[in-house]
Amino acid sequence: MKTYAALAFALTTLCSPLHAASWQICRLDVQIVNVLKQPYPQLQGRILKVAPTTPTTQCPQQGSTLTFTPETADYQNTLPRRQWPRKGQSVQIDYRYLDGICKGDGHPHPCRIEHYPLMGR
């Protein structure tokens, strides 16, 4: 028990604290212009309106094209294909991103985790 307590104390005093970043959110109105099949199913849309939730959020520009895989509103799952909007439809997306450091290949590098949940589906 003493060894465990000593190890816990050492880890809490020697390790620097970790700081969690927060999700940045952009509310986007998007018109679907294409349904892509290659290299895997995705939607392509033209951004009609952009509304960042904070002034420092880096949102895609209005009028630009966005290629994405639609997700559920809780961004936990890909939306089933039968629920995807069709070409010509307009949808609202709460585009979310989190910037951080990825270590997948053993070499830390900056990366961005992105989610594209469709709202109201």
Image (cartoon, rainbow, N blue to C red):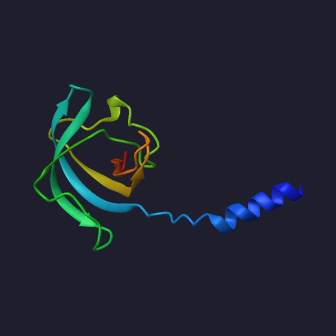
From the viewer's perspective, tell me whether residue 4 is left or right of residue 109: right
Residue at 37% x, 57% y is 99
Residue lying at the far bottom of the rendered structure: 55
The relative height of residue 91 versus residue 16 in the rendered view (above or below) is above
Residue at 22% x, 55% y is 29
Residue at 19% x, 32% y is 35
Q: Position of residue 101 (x, y in %)?
A: 40, 54
Quadrant into which the N terminus falls = bottom right
Q: Position of residue 109 (x, y in %)?
A: 36, 50
The relative height of residue 63 versus residue 89 in the rendered view (above or below) is below
Q: Nearer the viewer, residue 37 or 20?
A: 20
Residue lying at the far left of the rendered structure: 63
The relative height of residue 37 versus residue 59 in the rendered view (above or below) is above
Q: Nearer the viewer, residue 39 or 104?
A: 104
Q: Nearer the viewer, residue 34 or 60?
A: 60
Q: Position of residue 115 (x, y in %)?
A: 36, 48
- Where residue 97 sits, quadrant-wise, is bottom left
From the viewer's perspective, tell me whether residue 16 is left or right of residue 34: right
Q: How many marks?
A: 0
Q: Position of residue 53 (x, y in %)?
A: 32, 69
Residue lying at the far right of the rendered structure: 1
Residue at 40% x, 45% y is 107
From the viewer's perspective, tell me whether residue 87 is left or right of residue 76: left
Quadrant into which the C terminus falls = top left
